[in-house]
């Protein structure tokens, strides 16, 4: 299988656009995860409306991942061919339309269909963010800019929880979905006028190249990144799907109060992730010439996430919040550092969009399991205790894999295309 890619080198001659484009890219991530937060916050009301069990709720929470998983790689290849401008508009418009569709659904199959369509729109989001941040930042800023982009996850989940919590409490979950969808449509108009149709790079234009996908599977370094991303993504999707319910159960909160505490967690996680990202760049500064130099930072951050395993033994609410905030912040920082590691390892940077898509195909396949497995564990045990033990073991396994496997750059075989 061959992947067609375009050149991805830092943009020049548009200094005034640089911060605006990066801010809009982060905002895309914020909107994406704000829309996901709405489902988690509204879940108790949706469960009531459709008469769902805990295990069925887990399937509802994972339903957008069904299409998201299968389309990660194809949408990333499409991104390399069509560019961030067009793909960004199409992606956000599709998932915003799906939010409207979900707000109008009167049956469970219709609602599940809206979540599947939402996954179609969100499929290229992470690869698009990685490509734009690399294109519009210098190599020394790459890890920090990726962490800034991934911090949009926490910002989106925090702001989405607050907005959705208020709207659900006062106007119902259907209105919450519609309001959040309107923000996505506004972003599409902004992106159309902000992102240039053509951009300048410091290199002379080169012919497009095509890369074989097989060398990825033969690379130990690639599998180190994949395994780490699978493990950190499991933790990410667990929190993204179940955090309001976790807080509601542990603290006996109302739906709105649980959304407020969820926002506290994600707001704190943003601060932690940005501090960790800046610290990681400082630690990596003396190893920028070593492609595998960033793997120790990734392993360290994933090890911090494993503190979730201690949560069942913590009975103080403030300490529980500290544990959740730290672990969630390092989930974001660990994911950002791991994707920056992928960019460091990949020799043929033209294929970075497709490489991100391939990694995310595997990691989102693991992410599909998190809400579902958690739903079954909750149904059979009535608590999240074993959920936390499981996620702690997974992220420690991911830390070990990223330390042991990446030892050399990832090289593909390029073939001239025109």
Image (spheres, helix red, strand yellow):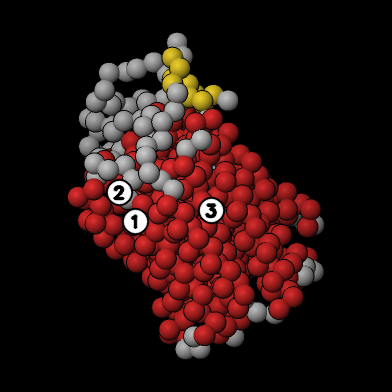
- Residue occupied by mark 2: 293
Q: Are marks 2 and 3 in contact (CB under 8 Å)?
A: no
State how far apart marks 1 and 3 are (Cα).
17 Å
In front: label 2 or label 3: 2
Q: Are marks 2 and 1 in contact (CB under 8 Å)?
A: yes
Which structural element holds mark 2? Answer: loop
Q: Residue at x 36, y 52 (%)?
A: 295
Which residue is at the front of the view, 417 or 174?
Answer: 417
Q: Quadrant of the C terminus?
A: top left
State how far apart marks 2 and 1 are (Cα).
7 Å
- Residue occupied by mark 1: 296
335 shown above or below 345: below
Q: Quadrant of the N terminus?
A: top right
Which callout, 2 or 3, points at the residue further toward the start of the chain? 3
Crowd band around label 1 with a 10 angstrom C-alpha radius: few (<14), some (14–19), many (20+): some
Q: Residue at x 45, y 17 (%)?
A: 415
Which structural element holds mark 3? Answer: helix
Which structural element holds mark 1? Answer: helix
Relative image position of residue 118 (x, y in whole percent):
62, 48
In front: label 1 or label 3: 1
In this rendering, position of residue 13 left or right of residue 378: left
Task: Residue 230: give its label.
Answer: 3
Which callout, 1 or 3, points at the residue further toward the start of the chain? 3
Q: Residue at x 40, y 46 (%)?
A: 406
Relative image position of residue 137 (x, y in whole percent):
28, 41
């Amino acid at each position: 299988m061959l992947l067609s890619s375009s050149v991805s080198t830092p943009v020049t001659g548009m200094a005034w656009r640089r911060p605006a484009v990066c801010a809009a890219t982060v905002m895309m991530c914020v909107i994406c995860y704000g829309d996901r937060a709405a489902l988690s916050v509204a879940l108790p009301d949706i469960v009531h409306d459709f008469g769902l069990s805990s295990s069925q709720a887990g399937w509802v929470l994972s339903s957008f991942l069904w299409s998201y998983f299968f389309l990660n790689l194809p949408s990333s290849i499409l991104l390399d061919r069509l560019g961030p401008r067009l793909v960004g508009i199409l992606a956000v418009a599709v998932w915003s339309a799906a939010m409207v569709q979900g707000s109008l659904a009167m049956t469970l199959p219709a609602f599940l269909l809206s979540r599947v369509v939402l996954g179609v729109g969100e499929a290229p989001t992470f690869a698009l963010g990685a490509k734009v941040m690399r294109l519009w930042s210098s190599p020394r800023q790459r890890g920090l800019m990726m962490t800034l982009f991934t911090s949009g996850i926490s910002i989106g989940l925090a702001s989405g929880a607050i907005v959705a919590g208020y709207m659900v409490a006062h106007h119902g979950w259907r209105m919450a979905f519609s309001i959040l969808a309107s923000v996505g449509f506004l972003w599409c108009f902004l992106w159309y006028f902000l992102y240039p149709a053509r951009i300048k790079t410091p290199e002379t234009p080169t012919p497009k190249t095509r890369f074989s996908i097989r060398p990825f599977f033969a690379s130990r370094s690639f599998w180190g990144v994949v395994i780490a991303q699978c493990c950190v993504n499991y933790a990410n999707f667990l929190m993204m799907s179940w955090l309001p319910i976790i807080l509601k159960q542990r603290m006996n909160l109302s739906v709105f109060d649980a959304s407020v505490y969820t926002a506290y967690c994600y707001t704190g996680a943003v601060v932690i992730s940005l501090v960790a990202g800046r610290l990681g760049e400082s630690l990596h500064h003396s190893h920028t010439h070593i492609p595998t130099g960033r793997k120790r930072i990734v392993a360290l951050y994933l090890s911090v996430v494993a503190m979730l395993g201690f949560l069942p033994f913590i009975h103080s609410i403030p300490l529980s919040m500290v544990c959740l905030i730290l672990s969630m912040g390092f989930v974001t920082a660990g994911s950002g550092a791991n994707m920056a590691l992928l960019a460091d390892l990949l020799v043929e940077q033209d294929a970075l969009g497709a490489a991100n898509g391939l990694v995310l195909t595997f990691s989102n396949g693991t992410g599909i399991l998190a809400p579902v497995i958690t739903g079954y564990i909750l149904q059979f045990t009535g608590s999240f205790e074993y959920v936390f033990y499981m996620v702690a073991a997974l992220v420690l396994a991911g830390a070990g894999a990223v330390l042991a496997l990446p030892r050399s750059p990832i090289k593909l075989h390029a073939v001239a295309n025109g």
